[in-house]
Image (tube, rainbow, N blue to C red):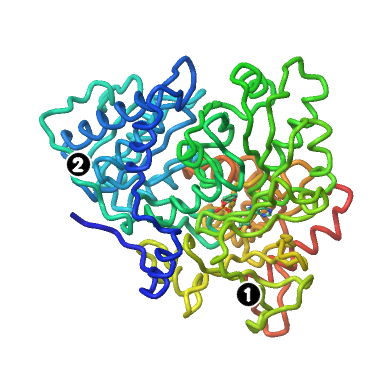
Protein backbone atom coordinates (compact mmCIF):
# COMPACT_ATOMS: atom_id res chain seq x y z
CA UNK A 1 0.00 0.00 0.00
CA UNK A 2 1.19 3.47 -0.84
CA UNK A 3 1.46 5.41 2.42
CA UNK A 4 1.83 9.14 2.00
CA UNK A 5 4.07 10.68 4.61
CA UNK A 6 4.49 14.19 5.87
CA UNK A 7 8.00 14.42 7.14
CA UNK A 8 9.03 16.29 10.24
CA UNK A 9 12.71 15.85 11.10
CA UNK A 10 13.09 13.06 13.65
CA UNK A 11 14.08 15.34 16.55
CA UNK A 12 10.83 17.31 16.11
CA UNK A 13 8.68 14.21 15.73
CA UNK A 14 10.22 12.81 18.91
CA UNK A 15 9.59 16.03 20.81
CA UNK A 16 5.95 16.19 19.66
CA UNK A 17 5.42 12.61 20.80
CA UNK A 18 7.27 13.06 24.10
CA UNK A 19 5.19 16.08 24.93
CA UNK A 20 2.00 14.14 24.29
CA UNK A 21 0.83 16.13 21.29
CA UNK A 22 1.02 13.14 18.98
CA UNK A 23 -0.56 10.15 20.66
CA UNK A 24 -0.55 7.53 17.94
CA UNK A 25 -4.32 7.57 17.57
CA UNK A 26 -5.95 7.41 14.11
CA UNK A 27 -8.93 9.29 12.72
CA UNK A 28 -11.13 6.22 12.72
CA UNK A 29 -9.68 5.03 16.02
CA UNK A 30 -10.74 8.06 18.03
CA UNK A 31 -14.30 7.93 16.70
CA UNK A 32 -14.59 4.22 17.39
CA UNK A 33 -13.40 4.82 20.94
CA UNK A 34 -16.02 7.53 21.42
CA UNK A 35 -18.70 5.27 19.97
CA UNK A 36 -17.79 2.60 22.51
CA UNK A 37 -17.99 5.11 25.35
CA UNK A 38 -21.20 6.90 24.37
CA UNK A 39 -22.92 4.73 21.73
CA UNK A 40 -26.40 6.12 22.30
CA UNK A 41 -25.61 9.83 22.34
CA UNK A 42 -26.51 11.74 19.22
CA UNK A 43 -23.47 12.38 17.03
CA UNK A 44 -25.03 14.22 14.10
CA UNK A 45 -28.32 15.75 13.09
CA UNK A 46 -29.07 16.92 9.55
CA UNK A 47 -32.16 17.09 7.33
CA UNK A 48 -34.49 14.53 8.86
CA UNK A 49 -31.69 12.27 10.03
CA UNK A 50 -30.47 11.83 13.61
CA UNK A 51 -27.56 9.42 14.04
CA UNK A 52 -26.09 8.24 17.32
CA UNK A 53 -22.36 7.61 17.71
CA UNK A 54 -23.02 3.88 17.27
CA UNK A 55 -25.10 4.63 14.17
CA UNK A 56 -22.39 6.78 12.65
CA UNK A 57 -19.69 4.18 13.22
CA UNK A 58 -21.89 1.41 11.76
CA UNK A 59 -22.56 3.46 8.63
CA UNK A 60 -18.87 4.34 8.28
CA UNK A 61 -17.86 0.67 8.48
CA UNK A 62 -20.48 -0.29 5.93
CA UNK A 63 -19.19 2.41 3.59
CA UNK A 64 -15.60 1.23 4.12
CA UNK A 65 -16.62 -2.26 2.99
CA UNK A 66 -18.49 -0.81 0.01
CA UNK A 67 -15.50 1.21 -1.16
CA UNK A 68 -13.18 -1.78 -0.94
CA UNK A 69 -15.68 -4.13 -2.58
CA UNK A 70 -15.80 -1.70 -5.50
CA UNK A 71 -12.09 -2.32 -6.05
CA UNK A 72 -10.52 0.67 -4.33
CA UNK A 73 -7.26 -0.20 -2.59
CA UNK A 74 -5.82 1.19 0.65
CA UNK A 75 -3.83 4.33 -0.16
CA UNK A 76 -6.04 5.30 -3.11
CA UNK A 77 -7.17 8.91 -3.12
CA UNK A 78 -10.89 9.74 -3.23
CA UNK A 79 -12.13 13.26 -3.93
CA UNK A 80 -15.07 14.09 -1.67
CA UNK A 81 -17.34 16.96 -2.69
CA UNK A 82 -20.36 16.95 -0.41
CA UNK A 83 -22.60 19.59 1.11
CA UNK A 84 -23.40 19.80 4.84
CA UNK A 85 -25.21 16.49 5.24
CA UNK A 86 -24.63 13.68 7.79
CA UNK A 87 -23.35 11.46 4.98
CA UNK A 88 -20.28 13.66 4.80
CA UNK A 89 -19.20 12.02 8.05
CA UNK A 90 -20.20 8.45 7.21
CA UNK A 91 -18.35 8.72 3.89
CA UNK A 92 -15.21 10.33 5.29
CA UNK A 93 -14.93 8.00 8.28
CA UNK A 94 -15.70 5.11 5.91
CA UNK A 95 -12.72 6.19 3.82
CA UNK A 96 -10.57 6.44 6.94
CA UNK A 97 -11.62 2.93 7.99
CA UNK A 98 -10.67 1.55 4.57
CA UNK A 99 -7.31 3.36 4.65
CA UNK A 100 -8.39 5.39 1.64
CA UNK A 101 -7.31 9.02 1.50
CA UNK A 102 -10.08 11.62 1.24
CA UNK A 103 -9.26 14.74 -0.75
CA UNK A 104 -11.57 17.53 0.32
CA UNK A 105 -13.17 19.70 -2.36
CA UNK A 106 -15.69 22.46 -1.66
CA UNK A 107 -19.24 22.35 -3.05
CA UNK A 108 -18.48 25.60 -4.92
CA UNK A 109 -15.71 23.97 -6.94
CA UNK A 110 -16.38 23.31 -10.61
CA UNK A 111 -14.71 21.55 -13.52
CA UNK A 112 -11.42 23.49 -13.51
CA UNK A 113 -10.82 22.98 -9.80
CA UNK A 114 -12.05 19.39 -9.54
CA UNK A 115 -10.08 18.17 -12.54
CA UNK A 116 -6.96 19.87 -11.20
CA UNK A 117 -7.49 18.24 -7.79
CA UNK A 118 -8.17 14.82 -9.31
CA UNK A 119 -5.00 15.03 -11.37
CA UNK A 120 -2.74 16.37 -8.64
CA UNK A 121 -3.96 13.79 -6.14
CA UNK A 122 -4.04 11.03 -8.79
CA UNK A 123 -7.47 10.21 -7.45
CA UNK A 124 -9.26 6.98 -8.28
CA UNK A 125 -12.76 7.94 -7.17
CA UNK A 126 -15.03 10.94 -6.70
CA UNK A 127 -17.93 11.10 -4.24
CA UNK A 128 -20.71 13.64 -4.79
CA UNK A 129 -24.30 14.23 -3.73
CA UNK A 130 -26.72 14.08 -6.67
CA UNK A 131 -27.55 17.75 -6.35
CA UNK A 132 -27.29 20.72 -4.07
CA UNK A 133 -29.83 23.48 -4.67
CA UNK A 134 -30.04 23.95 -8.43
CA UNK A 135 -26.72 22.39 -9.23
CA UNK A 136 -26.42 18.86 -10.63
CA UNK A 137 -23.14 17.30 -9.49
CA UNK A 138 -23.65 14.28 -11.74
CA UNK A 139 -23.31 16.55 -14.77
CA UNK A 140 -20.07 17.90 -13.29
CA UNK A 141 -18.87 14.34 -12.59
CA UNK A 142 -19.49 13.46 -16.24
CA UNK A 143 -17.28 16.34 -17.40
CA UNK A 144 -14.60 15.57 -14.82
CA UNK A 145 -14.47 11.95 -15.90
CA UNK A 146 -14.16 12.92 -19.53
CA UNK A 147 -11.21 15.14 -18.68
CA UNK A 148 -9.43 13.16 -15.95
CA UNK A 149 -8.54 9.76 -17.31
CA UNK A 150 -7.43 8.11 -14.07
CA UNK A 151 -10.77 8.51 -12.32
CA UNK A 152 -12.25 5.02 -12.11
CA UNK A 153 -15.39 5.46 -10.01
CA UNK A 154 -18.01 8.09 -9.32
CA UNK A 155 -20.12 7.43 -6.25
CA UNK A 156 -23.30 9.39 -5.72
CA UNK A 157 -25.43 10.01 -2.65
CA UNK A 158 -28.99 10.01 -3.95
CA UNK A 159 -30.14 9.29 -7.51
CA UNK A 160 -26.95 8.11 -9.21
CA UNK A 161 -28.05 7.93 -12.88
CA UNK A 162 -25.24 6.02 -14.68
CA UNK A 163 -22.90 6.19 -11.63
CA UNK A 164 -22.72 4.08 -8.45
CA UNK A 165 -25.32 4.89 -5.82
CA UNK A 166 -23.63 4.71 -2.42
CA UNK A 167 -26.59 2.93 -0.86
CA UNK A 168 -26.76 0.45 -3.73
CA UNK A 169 -23.15 -0.70 -3.41
CA UNK A 170 -22.68 -4.17 -2.02
CA UNK A 171 -20.37 -4.70 0.93
CA UNK A 172 -19.09 -7.95 -0.57
CA UNK A 173 -16.97 -10.30 1.47
CA UNK A 174 -14.19 -7.84 2.21
CA UNK A 175 -12.03 -7.88 5.29
CA UNK A 176 -11.33 -4.39 6.53
CA UNK A 177 -7.61 -3.60 6.70
CA UNK A 178 -5.64 -3.08 9.93
CA UNK A 179 -5.32 0.55 11.07
CA UNK A 180 -2.72 2.72 9.32
CA UNK A 181 0.22 4.29 11.10
CA UNK A 182 -0.82 7.48 12.91
CA UNK A 183 2.15 9.23 11.29
CA UNK A 184 0.80 8.51 7.81
CA UNK A 185 -1.17 11.07 5.84
CA UNK A 186 -4.87 10.76 6.66
CA UNK A 187 -6.24 13.09 3.98
CA UNK A 188 -5.41 15.89 1.59
CA UNK A 189 -6.87 19.33 2.17
CA UNK A 190 -6.92 22.06 -0.47
CA UNK A 191 -4.96 25.27 -0.01
CA UNK A 192 -6.63 28.64 -0.30
CA UNK A 193 -4.05 29.28 -3.00
CA UNK A 194 -2.16 32.57 -3.37
CA UNK A 195 -0.26 31.57 -6.43
CA UNK A 196 -1.82 29.76 -9.33
CA UNK A 197 -3.82 26.63 -8.76
CA UNK A 198 -4.63 25.07 -5.40
CA UNK A 199 -1.99 23.00 -3.71
CA UNK A 200 -2.71 19.83 -1.78
CA UNK A 201 -2.06 19.82 1.94
CA UNK A 202 -1.19 16.44 3.45
CA UNK A 203 -2.30 16.11 7.08
CA UNK A 204 -1.37 13.15 9.25
CA UNK A 205 -3.58 11.45 11.83
CA UNK A 206 -1.22 12.51 14.61
CA UNK A 207 -0.94 16.17 13.68
CA UNK A 208 -4.56 16.81 12.77
CA UNK A 209 -5.98 15.06 15.82
CA UNK A 210 -3.74 17.17 18.01
CA UNK A 211 -5.02 20.36 16.37
CA UNK A 212 -8.71 19.58 16.89
CA UNK A 213 -8.31 17.89 20.27
CA UNK A 214 -6.60 21.03 21.59
CA UNK A 215 -9.12 23.23 19.74
CA UNK A 216 -12.05 21.41 21.35
CA UNK A 217 -10.50 22.16 24.70
CA UNK A 218 -9.77 25.83 23.92
CA UNK A 219 -13.35 26.27 22.65
CA UNK A 220 -14.80 24.62 25.75
CA UNK A 221 -16.49 21.66 24.04
CA UNK A 222 -17.99 18.92 26.24
CA UNK A 223 -20.44 16.07 25.68
CA UNK A 224 -23.20 18.61 26.31
CA UNK A 225 -22.10 20.94 23.52
CA UNK A 226 -24.12 21.25 20.33
CA UNK A 227 -21.89 22.38 17.47
CA UNK A 228 -23.55 23.71 14.32
CA UNK A 229 -21.79 23.79 10.94
CA UNK A 230 -23.11 26.55 8.72
CA UNK A 231 -19.97 27.07 6.61
CA UNK A 232 -19.02 24.38 4.06
CA UNK A 233 -17.95 21.48 6.26
CA UNK A 234 -14.98 20.46 4.09
CA UNK A 235 -13.18 23.72 4.79
CA UNK A 236 -10.48 23.46 7.43
CA UNK A 237 -12.16 25.99 9.76
CA UNK A 238 -15.54 24.19 10.24
CA UNK A 239 -13.76 20.86 10.00
CA UNK A 240 -11.22 21.29 12.77
CA UNK A 241 -11.39 24.65 14.53
CA UNK A 242 -12.81 22.99 16.59
CA UNK A 243 -15.10 21.87 13.79
CA UNK A 244 -16.97 18.66 13.29
CA UNK A 245 -13.92 16.58 14.14
CA UNK A 246 -13.32 18.49 17.37
CA UNK A 247 -17.02 18.06 18.23
CA UNK A 248 -16.83 14.29 17.67
CA UNK A 249 -13.63 14.13 19.66
CA UNK A 250 -15.41 15.81 22.57
CA UNK A 251 -18.47 13.56 22.24
CA UNK A 252 -20.62 16.57 21.39
CA UNK A 253 -23.53 16.72 18.95
CA UNK A 254 -23.15 18.12 15.43
CA UNK A 255 -25.94 19.97 13.66
CA UNK A 256 -25.48 20.17 9.89
CA UNK A 257 -26.96 23.37 8.52
CA UNK A 258 -27.34 23.38 4.75
CA UNK A 259 -27.25 27.16 4.40
CA UNK A 260 -25.63 29.95 6.41
CA UNK A 261 -28.73 32.09 5.85
CA UNK A 262 -29.53 33.71 9.23
CA UNK A 263 -33.18 32.73 9.51
CA UNK A 264 -32.58 29.09 8.49
CA UNK A 265 -29.68 28.87 10.92
CA UNK A 266 -31.60 30.58 13.74
CA UNK A 267 -34.46 28.09 13.32
CA UNK A 268 -31.99 25.23 13.80
CA UNK A 269 -30.28 26.94 16.72
CA UNK A 270 -33.65 27.20 18.46
CA UNK A 271 -34.75 23.66 17.62
CA UNK A 272 -31.49 21.92 18.50
CA UNK A 273 -30.38 24.27 21.29
CA UNK A 274 -27.07 24.92 19.50
CA UNK A 275 -24.32 26.15 21.85
CA UNK A 276 -21.46 26.95 19.46
CA UNK A 277 -20.91 27.68 15.78
CA UNK A 278 -18.43 29.40 13.45
CA UNK A 279 -18.80 32.05 10.76
CA UNK A 280 -16.78 34.21 8.40
CA UNK A 281 -17.03 37.96 9.12
CA UNK A 282 -19.60 38.88 6.42
CA UNK A 283 -21.99 36.24 7.74
CA UNK A 284 -21.43 37.36 11.31
CA UNK A 285 -22.49 40.86 10.22
CA UNK A 286 -25.66 39.48 8.63
CA UNK A 287 -26.50 37.38 11.67
CA UNK A 288 -26.05 40.34 14.00
CA UNK A 289 -28.39 42.38 11.85
CA UNK A 290 -30.97 39.61 11.57
CA UNK A 291 -30.94 38.90 15.31
CA UNK A 292 -32.55 42.27 16.01
CA UNK A 293 -35.81 41.27 14.33
CA UNK A 294 -35.71 37.47 14.34
CA UNK A 295 -38.56 35.60 16.01
CA UNK A 296 -36.28 32.70 16.87
CA UNK A 297 -34.76 32.13 20.27
CA UNK A 298 -30.99 31.90 19.93
CA UNK A 299 -30.27 32.21 23.64
CA UNK A 300 -28.69 28.72 23.75
CA UNK A 301 -25.71 30.07 21.78
CA UNK A 302 -22.70 30.45 24.05
CA UNK A 303 -19.80 30.90 21.64
CA UNK A 304 -19.53 32.33 18.14
CA UNK A 305 -16.22 31.67 16.40
CA UNK A 306 -15.35 34.16 13.70
CA UNK A 307 -12.42 33.67 11.35
CA UNK A 308 -11.23 33.11 7.80
CA UNK A 309 -10.79 36.84 7.25
CA UNK A 310 -10.27 39.90 9.41
CA UNK A 311 -13.19 40.75 11.70
CA UNK A 312 -13.29 44.51 12.22
CA UNK A 313 -13.07 45.49 15.91
CA UNK A 314 -16.21 47.62 15.58
CA UNK A 315 -18.20 44.59 14.43
CA UNK A 316 -16.49 42.33 16.96
CA UNK A 317 -17.54 44.64 19.77
CA UNK A 318 -21.24 44.13 18.91
CA UNK A 319 -21.36 40.33 19.05
CA UNK A 320 -22.21 39.98 22.71
CA UNK A 321 -24.96 42.61 22.69
CA UNK A 322 -26.64 41.38 19.51
CA UNK A 323 -26.28 37.60 19.73
CA UNK A 324 -25.88 37.19 23.48
CA UNK A 325 -22.77 35.02 23.24
CA UNK A 326 -19.00 35.21 23.59
CA UNK A 327 -17.00 35.96 20.48
CA UNK A 328 -13.97 33.77 19.86
CA UNK A 329 -11.75 35.00 17.06
CA UNK A 330 -9.88 32.35 15.10
CA UNK A 331 -7.04 33.00 12.72
CA UNK A 332 -5.96 29.82 11.05
CA UNK A 333 -4.84 28.23 7.83
CA UNK A 334 -5.32 24.83 6.22
CA UNK A 335 -1.51 24.41 6.26
CA UNK A 336 -1.59 24.27 10.05
CA UNK A 337 -1.17 27.07 12.58
CA UNK A 338 -4.40 28.11 14.30
CA UNK A 339 -4.75 30.99 16.78
CA UNK A 340 -7.68 31.63 19.08
CA UNK A 341 -8.68 34.30 21.50
CA UNK A 342 -9.44 32.42 24.72
CA UNK A 343 -12.93 32.36 26.19
CA UNK A 344 -11.73 34.01 29.41
CA UNK A 345 -9.59 36.68 27.72
CA UNK A 346 -10.41 40.30 28.56
CA UNK A 347 -13.04 41.76 26.22
CA UNK A 348 -10.41 44.07 24.75
CA UNK A 349 -8.28 41.12 23.60
CA UNK A 350 -11.30 39.30 22.17
CA UNK A 351 -12.31 42.35 20.15
CA UNK A 352 -8.96 43.65 18.97
CA UNK A 353 -6.81 40.59 18.36
CA UNK A 354 -6.91 37.33 16.44
CA UNK A 355 -5.61 35.37 19.42
CA UNK A 356 -2.61 33.20 20.07
CA UNK A 357 -1.47 29.79 18.87
CA UNK A 358 -2.93 26.51 20.06
CA UNK A 359 0.35 24.94 21.07
CA UNK A 360 3.28 25.97 23.28
CA UNK A 361 5.39 24.40 20.51
CA UNK A 362 3.96 26.53 17.71
CA UNK A 363 7.01 28.55 16.71
CA UNK A 364 6.00 31.94 15.40
CA UNK A 365 8.42 34.38 13.78
CA UNK A 366 7.45 37.87 12.68
CA UNK A 367 10.12 39.19 10.35
CA UNK A 368 10.91 42.03 7.95
CA UNK A 369 11.81 41.58 4.28
CA UNK A 370 15.38 40.60 5.24
CA UNK A 371 14.19 37.88 7.60
CA UNK A 372 15.06 39.83 10.76
CA UNK A 373 12.63 39.74 13.68
CA UNK A 374 10.58 42.91 14.17
CA UNK A 375 9.75 44.41 17.58
CA UNK A 376 6.43 43.72 19.34
CA UNK A 377 3.70 45.90 17.88
CA UNK A 378 5.49 46.24 14.53
CA UNK A 379 4.02 44.55 11.45
CA UNK A 380 6.02 41.81 9.80
CA UNK A 381 5.71 38.60 7.81
CA UNK A 382 4.44 35.63 9.77
CA UNK A 383 6.50 32.42 9.53
CA UNK A 384 5.61 29.35 11.52
CA UNK A 385 6.43 25.74 12.22
CA UNK A 386 5.09 23.38 14.81
CA UNK A 387 3.40 20.09 15.67
CA UNK A 388 0.48 20.49 13.26
CA UNK A 389 1.94 22.75 10.54
CA UNK A 390 2.97 20.96 7.37
CA UNK A 391 6.56 20.90 6.18
CA UNK A 392 5.67 20.43 2.49
CA UNK A 393 2.77 20.38 0.05
CA UNK A 394 1.91 17.14 -1.71
CA UNK A 395 3.76 16.58 -4.95
CA UNK A 396 4.68 20.21 -5.69
CA UNK A 397 8.41 21.01 -5.57
CA UNK A 398 8.03 24.49 -7.04
CA UNK A 399 5.45 25.54 -4.44
CA UNK A 400 7.51 23.98 -1.66
CA UNK A 401 10.58 25.96 -2.63
CA UNK A 402 8.55 29.18 -2.36
CA UNK A 403 6.42 28.42 0.66
CA UNK A 404 8.92 26.92 3.12
CA UNK A 405 12.23 28.21 4.48
CA UNK A 406 15.20 25.84 4.46
CA UNK A 407 14.69 25.26 8.18
CA UNK A 408 11.09 24.23 7.72
CA UNK A 409 9.08 27.34 8.52
CA UNK A 410 5.89 27.86 6.51
CA UNK A 411 5.70 31.33 4.98
CA UNK A 412 2.07 32.18 5.67
CA UNK A 413 2.06 35.32 3.50
CA UNK A 414 0.21 37.11 6.31
CA UNK A 415 1.42 40.37 7.79
CA UNK A 416 0.82 40.41 11.53
CA UNK A 417 1.98 42.13 14.68
CA UNK A 418 2.22 40.75 18.19
CA UNK A 419 0.88 42.40 21.32
CA UNK A 420 2.98 42.33 24.51
CA UNK A 421 0.65 39.57 25.80
CA UNK A 422 1.53 37.42 22.78
CA UNK A 423 -1.67 37.82 20.79
CA UNK A 424 -1.49 38.27 17.05
CA UNK A 425 -3.19 41.03 15.11
CA UNK A 426 -3.59 40.45 11.37
CA UNK A 427 -2.56 43.58 9.51
CA UNK A 428 -2.64 42.46 5.87
CA UNK A 429 -1.28 40.09 3.25
CA UNK A 430 1.98 39.97 1.39
CA UNK A 431 0.71 37.49 -1.16
CA UNK A 432 -1.49 38.32 -4.10
CA UNK A 433 -4.76 36.76 -3.25
CA UNK A 434 -8.18 38.13 -2.69
CA UNK A 435 -9.79 37.11 0.59
CA UNK A 436 -13.39 37.26 -0.55
CA UNK A 437 -15.53 36.63 2.52
CA UNK A 438 -13.07 33.99 3.67
CA UNK A 439 -12.75 32.34 0.23
CA UNK A 440 -9.21 32.78 -1.04
CA UNK A 441 -8.88 33.60 -4.75
CA UNK A 442 -5.48 33.55 -6.41
CA UNK A 443 -4.91 36.61 -8.61
CA UNK A 444 -2.63 34.62 -10.89
CA UNK A 445 -5.18 31.88 -11.46
CA UNK A 446 -7.85 34.36 -12.59
CA UNK A 447 -5.41 36.30 -14.73
CA UNK A 448 -4.61 33.07 -16.57
CA UNK A 449 -8.28 32.52 -17.33
CA UNK A 450 -8.77 36.10 -18.51
CA UNK A 451 -5.73 35.86 -20.77
CA UNK A 452 -7.29 32.88 -22.52
CA UNK A 453 -9.97 35.19 -23.95
CA UNK A 454 -9.16 36.31 -27.51
CA UNK A 455 -10.18 39.90 -26.71
CA UNK A 456 -7.76 40.21 -23.78
CA UNK A 457 -4.24 41.48 -24.30
CA UNK A 458 -3.22 41.60 -20.65
CA UNK A 459 -4.89 41.36 -17.25
CA UNK A 460 -4.04 42.00 -13.62
CA UNK A 461 -6.39 41.00 -10.81
CA UNK A 462 -6.27 42.79 -7.45
CA UNK A 463 -8.22 42.88 -4.22
CA UNK A 464 -10.16 46.03 -3.42
CA UNK A 465 -11.96 46.79 -0.16
CA UNK A 466 -15.61 45.83 -0.01
CA UNK A 467 -17.93 46.84 2.80
CA UNK A 468 -19.74 43.52 2.79
CA UNK A 469 -17.22 40.92 1.57
CA UNK A 470 -14.17 42.48 3.21
CA UNK A 471 -12.41 42.28 -0.15
CA UNK A 472 -13.66 41.78 -3.67
CA UNK A 473 -11.79 41.12 -6.89
CA UNK A 474 -11.18 43.74 -9.53
CA UNK A 475 -9.66 42.74 -12.86
CA UNK A 476 -7.82 45.42 -14.81
CA UNK A 477 -7.87 44.36 -18.43
CA UNK A 478 -6.08 45.72 -21.47
CA UNK A 479 -8.34 44.73 -24.36
CA UNK A 480 -7.28 43.89 -27.88
CA UNK A 481 -8.95 45.68 -30.78
CA UNK A 482 -12.17 43.79 -30.29
CA UNK A 483 -12.92 44.83 -26.71
CA UNK A 484 -15.21 42.22 -25.12
CA UNK A 485 -18.29 43.24 -23.15
CA UNK A 486 -17.88 43.01 -19.38
CA UNK A 487 -20.74 40.53 -18.99
CA UNK A 488 -19.33 38.43 -21.81
CA UNK A 489 -15.90 38.36 -20.19
CA UNK A 490 -17.37 37.33 -16.85
CA UNK A 491 -19.43 34.65 -18.61
CA UNK A 492 -16.26 33.47 -20.36
CA UNK A 493 -14.41 33.05 -17.05
CA UNK A 494 -17.42 31.29 -15.52
CA UNK A 495 -17.63 29.08 -18.59
CA UNK A 496 -14.07 27.87 -17.98
CA UNK A 497 -15.59 25.86 -15.14
CA UNK A 498 -14.63 27.90 -12.11
CA UNK A 499 -16.15 28.30 -8.69
CA UNK A 500 -18.49 31.29 -8.84
CA UNK A 501 -16.57 33.14 -6.13
CA UNK A 502 -13.57 33.35 -8.49
CA UNK A 503 -15.38 35.21 -11.28
CA UNK A 504 -14.08 38.83 -11.07
CA UNK A 505 -16.54 41.02 -9.20
CA UNK A 506 -15.51 44.01 -11.23
CA UNK A 507 -13.72 44.48 -14.54
CA UNK A 508 -12.06 47.77 -15.47
CA UNK A 509 -10.66 48.28 -18.98
CA UNK A 510 -7.43 50.28 -19.23
CA UNK A 511 -5.27 51.26 -22.19
CA UNK A 512 -1.98 50.25 -20.67
CA UNK A 513 -0.30 49.32 -17.41
CA UNK A 514 2.11 51.80 -15.96
CA UNK A 515 5.68 50.67 -16.48
CA UNK A 516 8.87 51.73 -14.80
CA UNK A 517 11.87 53.29 -16.53
CA UNK A 518 13.19 49.79 -17.14
CA UNK A 519 10.03 49.13 -19.07
CA UNK A 520 9.03 46.01 -17.28
CA UNK A 521 7.24 45.68 -14.02
CA UNK A 522 6.73 42.62 -11.86
CA UNK A 523 3.19 41.35 -11.49
CA UNK A 524 3.43 42.00 -7.80
CA UNK A 525 4.40 45.66 -8.21
CA UNK A 526 1.83 46.09 -10.94
CA UNK A 527 -0.95 44.73 -8.77
CA UNK A 528 0.15 47.02 -5.96
CA UNK A 529 0.07 50.04 -8.29
CA UNK A 530 -3.36 49.16 -9.57
CA UNK A 531 -4.70 48.68 -6.07
CA UNK A 532 -3.43 52.13 -5.13
CA UNK A 533 -4.79 53.63 -8.32
CA UNK A 534 -8.17 52.08 -7.59
CA UNK A 535 -8.26 53.49 -4.08
CA UNK A 536 -7.33 56.95 -5.34
CA UNK A 537 -9.89 57.06 -8.10
CA UNK A 538 -12.95 55.50 -6.49
CA UNK A 539 -12.69 56.14 -2.76
CA UNK A 540 -16.41 56.79 -2.41
CA UNK A 541 -17.15 53.16 -3.26
CA UNK A 542 -15.24 51.75 -0.32
C1 LIG B 1 -8.76 29.60 7.06
O1 LIG B 1 -7.94 28.83 6.30
P1 LIG B 1 -7.54 29.10 4.78
O2 LIG B 1 -6.47 28.11 4.48
O3 LIG B 1 -8.75 29.14 3.91
O4 LIG B 1 -6.95 30.56 4.71
C2 LIG B 1 -5.86 30.97 5.51
C3 LIG B 1 -5.68 32.46 5.42
C4 LIG B 1 -4.69 33.01 6.41
O5 LIG B 1 -3.37 32.85 5.96
C5 LIG B 1 -5.13 34.46 6.47
O6 LIG B 1 -4.67 35.15 5.34
C6 LIG B 1 -6.63 34.37 6.37
O7 LIG B 1 -6.90 33.14 5.72
N1 LIG B 1 -7.30 34.37 7.69
C7 LIG B 1 -7.52 35.47 8.44
C8 LIG B 1 -8.20 35.03 9.60
N2 LIG B 1 -8.35 33.69 9.51
C9 LIG B 1 -7.80 33.31 8.34
N3 LIG B 1 -7.20 36.76 8.24
C10 LIG B 1 -7.56 37.64 9.22
N4 LIG B 1 -8.21 37.29 10.34
C11 LIG B 1 -8.55 36.01 10.58
N5 LIG B 1 -9.21 35.68 11.71
O8 LIG B 1 -9.27 30.63 6.65
C12 LIG B 1 -8.97 29.13 8.46
C13 LIG B 1 -8.51 27.88 8.85
C14 LIG B 1 -8.73 27.45 10.16
C15 LIG B 1 -9.39 28.28 11.04
C16 LIG B 1 -9.85 29.51 10.64
C17 LIG B 1 -9.64 29.95 9.35
Q: Which residue is mark 1?
A: 522
Q: Is residue 464 left or right of residue 219?
A: right
Q: Kindly report the distance in space between the C-alpha atoms of the residues bearing marks 2 and 1.
A: 46 Å
Residue at the spot 38% in from the left edge and 32% down from the top edge = 37
Closer to us: 350 or 83:
350
Q: Is residue 195 left or right of residue 467?
A: left
Secondary structure under tag 2 reads loop
- Name the spot of residue 362 as percent of width and height, x first: 56, 65
Q: Is mark 1 within 8 Å of ligand 1?
A: no
Q: Is mark 2 within 8 Å of ligand 1?
A: no
Q: Is residue 68 above or below residue 313?
A: above
Secondary structure under tag 1 reads loop
**Residue 323 makes an appearance in the image:** yes
Give the mark, 2 or 1, whose residue is nearer the N terminus.
Answer: 2
Q: Quadrant of the N terminus?
A: bottom left
Closer to us: 211 or 390:
211
Query: Could you say which disc has been placed on residue 72 in the image?
Result: 2
Residue at the spot 35% in from the left edge and 26% down from the top edge = 54
- Name the spot of residue 436 as percent of width and height, x first: 65, 47
Q: Is residue 346 above or below residue 49?
A: below
- Name the spot of residue 28 as percent of width and height, x first: 33, 41
- Name the spot of residue 498 as percent of width and height, x first: 50, 44
Q: Residues within 10 Å of mark 2 (few under 14, many from 20)?
A: many
Closer to us: 52 or 270:
52
Q: Which corner quadrant of the image does residue 353 belong to?
A: bottom right
Amino acid sequence: MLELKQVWPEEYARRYRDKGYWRGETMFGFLERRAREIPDRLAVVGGDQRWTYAGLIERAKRNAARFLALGLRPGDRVVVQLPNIPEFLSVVFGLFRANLIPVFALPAHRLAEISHIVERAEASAYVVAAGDGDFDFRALAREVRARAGGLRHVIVIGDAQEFHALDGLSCGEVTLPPPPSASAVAFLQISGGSTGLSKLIPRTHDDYIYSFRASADICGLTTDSVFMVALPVAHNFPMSSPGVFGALFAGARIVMCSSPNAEAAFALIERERVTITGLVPPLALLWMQAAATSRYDVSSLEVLLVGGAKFAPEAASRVRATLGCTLQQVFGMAEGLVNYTRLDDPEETIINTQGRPISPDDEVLIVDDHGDAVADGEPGLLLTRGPYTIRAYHNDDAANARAFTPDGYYRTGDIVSRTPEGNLVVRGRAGDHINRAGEKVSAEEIEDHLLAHPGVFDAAVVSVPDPYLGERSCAFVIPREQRPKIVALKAFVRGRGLAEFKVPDQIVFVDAFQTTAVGKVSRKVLRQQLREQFLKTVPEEV
